[in-house]
Image (tube, grey):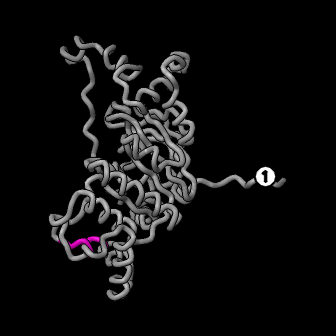
Amino acid sequence: MTPEPEREPVIRCRGVVKRFGNKTVIDGLDLDVFPGETMVVMGGSGSGKSTTLRMMIGSVETSAGSIELFGKNICGMRERALNDVRKKIGVLFQSGALFNSMTIAGNVALPLQEHTDLDPDIIDIQVKIKLELVGLREHADKFPAEISGGMKKRAGLARALALDPQILFYDEPSAGLDPVTSAEIDRLIIDLSKKLGVTSVVITHEMDSAFAIADRMAMLDKGKMLVVETREWYERVRDTPDADAHAMPESQRLIRQFLRGDAEGPITERKAASSYADDLLGGGEAPPVLPSVEPTRG
């Protein structure tokens, strides 16, 4: 039987490091994301999830290592070349990041107006198609202030789809949504992957959403990548009985606690072990202020 040829990743991260001053936020991250799959990147607050996403889309530069999109290393890439790469990706920001002075249709049309030479009539058709994909075609003429939080997320997704990207990045797509709306967003992510064949990278700490949409999952802890594995592997770790959990390696017990939301485990033990006296006396390091976008490369 002829072996299946090895797939080339559409995203390849190798030895990625990010420092802000003397604080290392991402420490030696390796990650491959393959065409058509949904990769969920998760971790607690301050684990480096959002910084990882920002480096992947080129809004924050790495301190070391390489990030390849479509076989091109974007680290140190000039702005014009980077913008050409960005035309192949779409980003759904946590808040939706819509322009309040523009209608929903206007928000979706903007990337097409800025980055293509399409006739306005063709742009109008494309906007209607993208809004139909996310179930908002009938709300095209509304402004962001006139729609719900879940509809804003869907409108932001329609805008992310405007240029027919090959990769979609989602930053906490379920954050701030009620359970029903969150489930609708999850179903939309799955449907888009199936219908359009896009590669998806989803940053989240919402475990119900993560297990609903993921093909593979990656766990970050204090800027280090603990494990990149299939959803099924993570399900087995999550479902390990208490009686067997003590025999697991510490990294797996940490993952299990995070997945289950348990009040006791390695994560809480680590927090309790931090020195209260050092914190009071100023011995601890203040968390860095992380920019959402770094200065242009020129």
Residue of label 1: 3
Frontmost residue, 162 versus 51: 162
| Residue 58 appears in view | no
Secondary structure mainly formed by the magenta segment: helix
Residue 270 lies in quadrant: top left
Place of residue 134 in the rendered image (x, y in percent of width and height, measured from the top left): 36, 67
| Residue 149 appears in view | yes
Place of residue 76 in the rendered image (x, y in percent of width and height, measured from the top left): 44, 53
Q: What's drawn in magenta, residue-wise?
A: 102-108
When the figure is inspected, residue 288 is found, relative to residue 79, above or below; the finding is above
Whether residue 289 sits left or right of residue 185 in the image: it is left
Q: Residues within 10 Å of mark 1 (few under 14, many from 20)?
A: few
Whether residue 121 sits left or right of residue 196 in the image: it is left
Q: Residue furthest right?
A: 1
Place of residue 31 in the rendered image (x, y in percent of width and height, measured from the top left): 53, 44
Frontmost residue, 69 versus 190: 190
Place of residue 262 in the rendered image (x, y in percent of width and height, measured from the top left): 37, 25
Whether residue 208 sits left or right of residue 30 in the image: it is left
> Which quadrant does the C terminus fall into?
bottom left
When the figure is inspected, residue 68 is found, relative to residue 272, above or below; the finding is below
Frontmost residue, 105 versus 114: 105
Q: Residue at x 28, y 42 (%)?
A: 290
Q: Is residue 104 magenta?
A: yes
Q: Amino acid at mark 1?
A: Pro
When the figure is inspected, residue 291 is found, relative to residue 244, above or below; the finding is below
Frontmost residue, 263 versus 204: 263
Q: Residue at x 54, y 60 (%)?
A: 70
Q: Residue at x 48, y 41 (%)?
A: 16
Q: Residue at x 18, y 70 (%)?
A: 143
Q: Secondary structure at mark 1?
A: loop
When the figure is inspected, residue 238 is found, relative to residue 52, above or below; the finding is above
Q: Is residue 20 magenta?
A: no
